Amino acid sequence: MSLIDKLDHKRLPAHIAIIMDGNGRWAKTRGLDRSEGHKKGVEAIRRVVEAASTASIQYLTLYAFSTENWRRPSDEVNGLMDLMVYALTRETADLKKNGVRIIAIGNIERLPDYVRETLQECIQETAGGKRLTLVIALSYSSKWELTEAVKKICNDVKSGTLQEEEISEVTIDNYLSTHALPDPDLLIRTGGEQRISNFLLWQCAYTEFYFTDTFWPDFNDEELYKAILEFQKRERRYGKISEQIEYEQ
Ligand code: IPE
Ligand code: IPE
Ligand code: MG
């Protein structure tokens, strides 16, 4: 029996975000090159996108490459860029067929031309997808995103298109690259580390966190459903007390 049958379909997270970590260590424990771990990681992405879609999750955000990852050895960075292009090229037709819409967040300008162009083609091709929105965080960091938002807000105040007194939390939401997305309900990090690594700092203000020691290449549909089941046991109080939450339900 699959864990999917145990899920409460009335209490599904609308948006799941995943820090896909542990590719390098997965490879190392097998005496393989780190690049082999990244390749296996692509297979895991395929499985998890399908599993999320089967479970009627609406938004899935995958942290694929952080601003800080540019600091890795150039061979690894180049290998990851090539892998990204290979995976996007190979998967676009299937994603489109399955109603998956791809969008990207992050400093896309910093990507090499061939990666940016492939990504943009994939975004255009899949734009009509209605089943699942797959958000790829690429060359992304939350501090970068927040800095960009502050700069844009300052510019708009200076030019008069935005009034300083009007600035609210919603204004800030609207200036982030995630403006069209709901905040994540559930954040999963694989690979054993328990940190946020500059990911969606603003958006995760009330997100439920789930950590697993499983390395990303071993993550699969059952592991995803296990995380969702754990999420469904949590009480989201948003500062209130339990009795208020029970009353509201
Ligand atoms: C995550 O796996 C993939 C990326 C950050 C691109 P890592 O490459 O960080 O794997 P570990 O953490 O070294 O095992
Ligand atoms: C976080 O993984 C970024 C991605 C999964 C893309 P890292 O492996 O780069 O994180 P840190 O630097 O160890 O926290
Ligand atoms: Mg890592």
Image (cartoon, grey):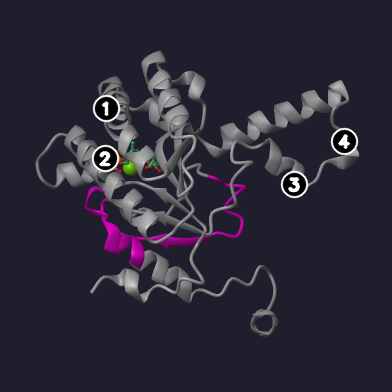
Q: How far apart are marks 1 and 4 (CA)?
A: 45 Å
Task: Residue at 72% x, 41% y: name it.
Answer: 172
* Mark nearer the viewer, 3 or 4: 3
Identify the amino acid type marked 2: Val
- Tell me the crowding category of disc 3: few under 14, some 14 to 19, or many 20 or more residues within 10 angstroms, Cα based: few
State the residue position of label 2.
Answer: 42
Q: Mark 1 points at which residue?
A: 86
* Whether residue 141 is situated above or below residue 73 in the rendered picture: below
Q: In which quarter of the image is the C terminus?
A: bottom right
Q: Do the residues labelled 4 and 2 touch (CB within 8 Å)?
A: no
Query: Disc 3 designates what residue?
Result: 170
Q: Dot 2: few (<14), some (14–19), or many (≥20) neighbours within 10 Å? A: some
Q: Three-letter amino acid code at disc 1? A: Tyr
Q: Image check: 182 left or right of 9?
A: right
Residue sitting at x 60%, y 36%: 177
Residue 156, x across and y down, in percent: 80, 26
The CA distance from mark 2 to mark 3 is: 35 Å
Amino acid type at circle 4 is: Glu
Which tag, 3 or 1, sits closer to the chain's start? 1
Mark closest to the chain's N terminus, 3 or 4: 4
Spatial CA span between label 3 and label 4:
13 Å
Per the rendered image, the range of residues in magenta is 200-225
Mark 4 highlights which residue? 164
Q: Left or right of 11: which side holds 94?
A: left
Q: Which residue occupies the foreground of this view, 15 or 188?
A: 15
Question: What residue appears at the point 85 percent right and 21 percent down from the top-left corner?
Answer: 159
* Label pair 1/2, CB-CB below 8 angstroms: yes
Q: Earlier in the sequence, mark 1 or mark 2?
A: 2
Which mark's residue is nearer the viewer, 4 or 2? 2
Closer to the eye: label 1 or 4: 1
The percent coordinates of residue 225 (x first, y second) are: 35, 65
Which of disc 2 and disc 4 is earlier in sequence? 2
